[in-house]
Image (cartoon, rainbow, N blue to C red):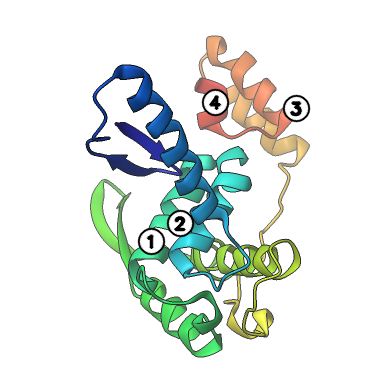
Amino acid sequence: YDFRVRGRRFSGTTGCETKRDAERWEKAERARVKTAEIDTANPLTFAAASSLYWHEVGQHHADAVGTERHLAWLQKQIGPTTMLVDVNSALLAKLVARRRGETVRRVRDGKVQEVHLAPATVNRSVTEMLRKILHRADRVWGAKVARIQWKDHLLAEPQERVREATQAEQEAALAAIPEDYAPALLFAILTGCRRVEIVG
């Protein structure tokens, strides 16, 4: 037999001699694994809770790939055997600090630089992701979870600066570019789309 349940692979021999018996055995084993994985009546590990969250909610997000990446990072940092009830405020503070210290490569002015993750990235990938999992565990699965003051762990995010081009700036930009670029620039002015959205 060889099947996957919530990204975890199960394989081996059924020990059966006929195909029909093997199929029956595999069906029963798959049902057993699903029941064991979803059994929220017993205390949950963080790995089980995050896998269940992925199955019920995360895989349906618009950015499911990002959600999966955040869950994988959290599972690696928290560990597979950590009980969900042990995911508390102190652990969250350590996770935020660890994630905040990570860097990514960015190209600025033609040079590759190592830059720290933005506060918004840390908030979305750690604090808010954990909050969603623990809230679902508490409200939907009836699991016991630690009470966390989530606002205490959110990093301050810089306010977005909203600025519109003046009529004179628009006219100057249109006069400075080749004529065949004008439709794209006018489209950008009218919609507020970014360059990558327009040319992509």
Which of label 4 and label 3 is nearer to you? Answer: 3
From what the image shows, is residue 17 above or below residue 106? above
**Residue density around tag 2, few if under 14, some if 14–19, many if 20 or more, within 10 Å:** some
Please report contact status of discs 1 and 2: CB closer than 8 Å, yes or no: yes
Q: Spatial distance from mark 2 to mark 3, Cα to Cα?
A: 35 Å
Residue located beneath label 2 in the image: 70
- Residue 149's spot in the image, x, y percent? 68, 85
Whether residue 66 can be seen here: no
Residue located beneath label 4 in the image: 176
Q: Earlier in the sequence, mark 2 or mark 3?
A: 2
Q: Earlier in the sequence, mark 4 or mark 3?
A: 4
Q: Spatial distance from mark 1 to mark 4, Cα to Cα?
A: 47 Å
- Residue 39's spot in the image, x, y percent? 58, 59
Which of label 3 and label 1 is nearer to you? Answer: 1
Q: Spatial distance from mark 4 to mark 3, Cα to Cα?
A: 18 Å
Instruction: Residue at 48% x, 47% y: name it.
Output: 32
Q: Earlier in the sequence, mark 3 or mark 1?
A: 1
Residue 73 is tagged as 1
**Residue density around tag 3, few if under 14, some if 14–19, many if 20 or more, within 10 Å:** few
What SS does tag 3 mark? helix
From what the image shows, is residue 189 above or below residue 64? above
- Residue 127's spot in the image, x, y percent? 56, 71
Residue 190 is tagged as 3
- Residue 46's spot in the image, x, y percent? 47, 68
Q: Spatial distance from mark 1 to mark 2, Cα to Cα?
A: 5 Å
